Image (cartoon, rainbow, N blue to C red):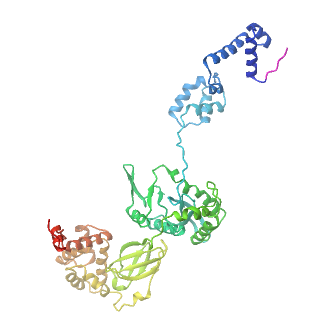
Amino acid sequence: MFEFFADRADLENRIVSMRAKGWAIRALARHFGMGRNTIRRILRKNEARRDLGHDALEDKRKSSRPSKLDEHRPMIASLLEEFPNITGVRMREELVAAGFDGGKTIVCDLLREIRPRPKIEPVVRFETEPGRQGQMDWSPYTIDFVEEGRRKVLCFSYILGHSRRQYLDFTFDRKFFTLIRRHQDAFAYFKGVPFTCLYDGEKTVVLRWEAGQPVFNPAFSAFATHYNFRPVACRPGRAQTKGKVEKPFQYVETNLLGARKFTGMADLRSTAQWWLANRSDTHIHGTTGVSPLQLFVEREKSALLPLPAHPYDSCEVALRVCGPDGFIEHDTNFYSVPVEYAADILTVKASEEEIFVYSPDLVRIARHERRPLGAREKMEDPAHRLASKVRYGLEPVREAFLRLGEHAGDFLDGLKSAHPRNCGFQARCILRQKENYHCDDIDAALGHASKYRAFDGKSVERILKARARPRTLESTARRKAGKLLEKLPEVRQRPLSEYSRLLGGKEE
């Protein structure tokens, strides 16, 4: 009589139950058309599971069967030791040459089984309280501007951790002053500041790591102190810590930059501000389920730190030597100053839109519109050319030359005798050495040159190279500050008894 069984388990159940009713093994083999040893294995397996217990996971495992790759395992191990990253296709090619006739599937399966896999640390999503944290990062893009051509730009992104409200802008560089100016724009956009902000290892924020702790840039720490927030550095190799600011860059690429053309940088920046208000703020966020602007207004806006009454002064300050033609150079562009300051060391204060120039006494003497880096333009104010002095020759630089030191007057007299026709040119060559040497060193070189009657600019330059040490303009300011401290009277702490006597108290 033919019996139908749904699967192997149903067949084994029928055999075990009939055995329990007293059927002999020979009778069961004849009834089911199976070998007696097969019947015995089924019965032994059932008895073992009943007496010793069983594991449900063990039941799911495949029984081990001989494989075509068993005889080639030594060769596989040797190839993996020499070439740890070998692919399944290449492994099969080598095995076929050694007599293997199987497909690539079993080779790839074996490699996945025996080759160690890199461990991936889990990324844990965490939420922050309103106003508690911000995250900042840069992302580079190459854009084909319609008018300006193909240029590389950097996207500055600042995002609030709770509401996911984002601020972004585009720049051509990521220098320190660019960084803090974009921060100021972000804080003004949010009308507040979060308590902390996450950063990666960029040098403008984190100088280095020592003993597992970040060493922050002192200039950036001063900026953070002004706005009362605390910078937090992500550990190297842990970019996922700033996942809230990293992920939105994909949205920027596909939505803001995707399928759009821009005439230039100004058009890109204005479009970005429109996109923030009409797309980024209003879209439904996949994690929070509401728009960033709604969550910002309802919860995070009131939790932010207030802005200071006055913004941080983000101007760049540098020292520049005014050229003999009355221009100073800053970021490849030239800006005019009154001609009486030719060859003087002047202070330049540069904001994002303007250039201010100050005299050695820190009196403002010029103001210009700032031109872009690399423009190589000359900005000249006609009022700077209305001085009563002669523009060329010795007279415009006579006073500056005499201020070099006590030997300058004698050297200038000898210079006029030796070079009556181009005395002014020689004096300008010597004054130009102020870019690399201290005035005291130049004055000593003038005295040495006068001693040997070497009245020309090249001789003074050779003496300076041989006898003086070059310096930067910034060291001049530190040197003057040191001299000022030397002239100040010594401050001594008075004993407390004198204060007690002054206040009418009794001495103890």
Quarter of the image with the C terminus in it: bottom left
The x and y percentages for residue 442 are: 24, 74
Residue occupying image coordinates x 48% and y 64%: 174
Which residue, as the protein is rendered here, is positioned at the far right? 1
The answer to whether 362 appears left or right of 162 in the picture is left
Residue occupying image coordinates x 60% and y 29%: 95
Q: Is residue 41 above or below residue 504?
A: above
Q: Is residue 171 above or below residue 394?
A: above
Which residue, as the protein is rendered here, is positioned at the far bottom? 388
Q: Which of 282 and 143 is in front in this view?
A: 282
Give the tally of numbered discs.
0
The answer to whether 147 appears left or right of 467 in the picture is right
Q: Nearer the viewer, residue 481 or 162?
A: 162
The x and y percentages for residue 349 are: 40, 75
Q: In this view, does 477 lie above or below 206?
A: below
Q: Nearer the viewer, residue 490 or 478?
A: 490
> Which quadrant of the structure image shows residue 62?
top right
The answer to whether 429 appears left or right of 76 in the picture is left
The x and y percentages for residue 507 are: 14, 67
Q: Is the magenta stretch mostly helix, strand or loop?
A: loop
Mark yes or no: residue 187 visible: yes
What segment is highlighted magenta in the picture?
Answer: 1-5
206 inside magenta stretch: no
The x and y percentages for residue 116 are: 53, 34
Residue occupying image coordinates x 47% and y 55%: 200
Which residue, as the protein is rendered here, is positioned at the far left? 507
Quarter of the image with the N terminus in it: top right
Mark yes or no: residue 459 visible: no
